[in-house]
Image: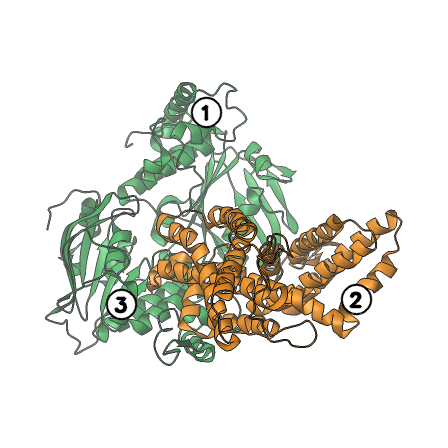
Chain colours: A orange, B green
Amino acid sequence: MSWRLQRVPNVPAGAALAGRLGAIVAALACVAAVLTLAGLAPGRLGAEVIGSAFGSIEGLEDLGLLVTPLILTGIAVALTQRIGLWNIGGEGQFNAGALAATAVGLHVGGDEIWVLPLMALAGAAGGAAWILVPTLARAFAGVSELITTLLLNFVAALLVAWLCTGPWRDPSGRALATTARIPAELPPLGDTLHWGFPAAIAVAVLAAGLLAFTRFGYEVRIAGANPGAALYAGIPVRARIVAVMLLSGAVAGLAGTIELAGTVHRLQGGISNNYGYLGIMVAVLARGSCLGVIAGAVLMAALLNAGIVLQTQGVNTSTVLAITGLILLFTAIGDEVVHYRPVRRTSAAD
Amino acid sequence: MGVPLAFPPGTAADAASGRPPAIPPGTPALVELQGITKAFPGVLANDAVDLTVMPGEIHALLGENGAGKSTLMNILTGIYQPDAGTIILDGYARALPSPQAAIRAGIGMVHQHFKLVPAFTVAENIHLGWSRTPWRASAAALEARTRALAERFNLAVRPDAVVGDLSAGEQQRVEILRVLARDTRLLILDEPTAVLTPAEARELFAALRAFRASGNAVIFISHKLDEVVAIADRISVLRGGRKVATRPAAGADERGLASLMVGHDITLRKARPRAAGTLVSAAPVLELDRVCARDDRGLMALRDVTLALHGGEILGIAGVAGNGQRELSQVVTGMRRVTQGAVRIDGRPVARTDAAAFAAAGIGHIPEDRLRSGLAPDLSVADNAVLRDYARPPVGKGGLFRPWAAARLARTLAAEAAVAVPDFGMPVRNLSGGNQQRLVARREIRIAERVLVAAYPSRGLDVGAIDTLLSYLAELRDRGRAVLLFSEELEEILELADRVAVLFEGRIMGVMPAAAADVETLGLMMGGRGARA
């Protein structure tokens, strides 16, 4: 009689969730071990991290400010994942969206009731415009969207940096390398949090609904799961790829708009704060599920927040990067491990 | 390859006669499997299977899908380890811990789906992963070695040809040569005639008899009862993981073997006469008028194809795989653009290549590679069940998609297909291959208001499932629908179709009433020898 591992094709949802939690705990345990070796007290640091994020209304609001853009950039990636593509350019579309919204915010006067929706439209259009060339190249020439979307990130970042140190520089001269403060602001929701947070959650819910309850969503899911089946069913795969990629860019552009109009209020270099890249991790953690993106964004925000706290305790910023990396690594391992069951090897007698 | 074949170390006389050599008494079995048991989660694939293969024997292995044939062969070729049981080779118990060990022990297998590299030449494929491949593997050296091997085993191959350009029969010869070159004494063939023309199959049988004549053995896996009786010395039948019988082939009757295989009597070659009062429509429902089309590589695949399909008839398309069947099935279902000619549905020319419009016009399509293009394996059973209906009520309304209506439709289809689905939200890949096929078939029959295009509908199904599927087609015909049936089984076409068309190199070689056609004439036309229609 002996035991061995057997792979099973299907994992119940409970076991999958347990695998995820186990992976996060294992990753944190690794971090704790390293911090202990570095002479720090992981227990005290952990309590402080959790307390600062979840222990007070202010902490929760700050967490919400981080969660908001992460939900949107996560949705941007999750949408393209459903049609079998990767939008690595969330960072660039975020910048392009913030840039377009700034153009409206700085140059269009009037009541916020009109200016804010106009900024949102401009931001979404900016994000979509930024992914337009990769989209057409993908749909009509088969060019890998991984490379094209990624490379445009650098172009967008440099464009933003140029604008806010050049033509759009704050004329008052009080702030460096940034535009003037944009008069239109998202209405507050508490002390620091604003209406961008519920808006982001609404976008996630809408995206989930779009995929599950519309013909368009069904066609996207078929085209993503098996392009051969889409061809067989007469689904216009190219048109769906174009629509999904543009939508993805628009959502990432909207993330830039909300960050600008709700949190930062000025266009400046580094406004994207890696949210575009972190969105990829959020979508991977969510396994491409739009509602799962909300949970993934909260986890990622808690990690970013932990980074801020740890820095005040003299821990290197790269430690935080290491933690996120470890969590992704352990998640990938955990997702595979839950497929295995120990089974008893039948003895030769029967 | 009609000449007698010679295999060392047999004598020329043995080989020429093609009869099994006389085995001296006391000779141990080449392979003896004792009590082989192998379990997978939820299924006992092999249950205490005993199998003895003597030197100089062609041993056929019969069984339905899921009877445990593949598992047993995977154990014998070192891919799986048995949970229990013993493998005895030449009288000595042996473990076969890896495929390499099995190859060293002289066991070689030719799989149904060839394991060749299409972009490599024949010589390169023969020498791939072979310890005796010379260190300096220049093309010329490999080709010379391959030529010598081909001569030694008398298997005609062209060493410098690229495998991807070869016909299925030629590729199979390469596979067999590759296996024999590694000093194989037990050759396992999995459904070897599935891809061959009748002439190629005869050549293969001659080669197998010559191989047997020199004291080697063959395990021959097949669904085809007639060829098993023709080629084998003994026949073992597996059913539900157990070996139910081993019989000498001489005197075995097909009907008895079939009932052993399925466990109950089935009617073989059951005639499915047209129901009384059903007529063939006067006007064709689907017409092709001098249609030309290119394949995926841009090569001309259909040339001047003219066909008319009437309601209430079954038109069979015969031909060796790769002669334009795939492209033809795609043209008539709106998946492939025609470069020339016209496609007409009910007399109206089709303006656009649009598979969804063809489906909406009542043309169902059981695709050739249904598991790859008929389904999205990772999506749920419900999502897959509505691939044809998602745009119309009750599943689709306006721009909406209603998952609950999809689940309801899926439940109906599963009931019609007699497929037990525990959870309609689970990925469709969790269903067995046979059940996936049945689901696709029912889905397409449901929408086939005018025409059902059935490409190789019985491929990969067991005898019972084929029987059910063919009666579905007959039933459609009786309801006045047209059926375009692609099949590699001539008997199947002759049994079911009203007319038969033969495709060869993208041309229709001829269309004739099935009643007037015979296997030999069709076989000649499939080989390109026939009057053009």
- Helix, strand or loop at label 2? It is helix
Mark 2 to mark 3: distance in Å?
59 Å
User: What residue is shown with label 2?
Assistant: A52
Q: Seen in the image, is A283 located left or right of residue B341? A: right
Q: Select label 1 or label 2 by which is in front.
A: 2
Q: Residues within 10 Å of mark 1 (few under 14, many from 20)?
A: few
Q: Earlier in the sequence, mark 3 or mark 1?
A: 1
Q: Residues within 10 Å of mark 2 (few under 14, many from 20)?
A: many
**Given contact means CB atoms under 8 Å apart, are the residues at marks 3 and 1 in contact?**
no
Q: Is residue B90 visible?
A: no
- Helix, strand or loop at label 1? It is loop
- What is the chain letter for disc 1? B
**Residue B487 vertical position relative to residue B128 in the rendered view, above or below:** below
User: What residue is shown with label 3?
Assistant: B357
**Residue B363 vertical position relative to residue A276 in the rendered view, above or below:** below
What's the residue type where badge 3 is placed? Answer: Ala
Q: Position of residue A245 (x, y in %)?
A: 44, 59
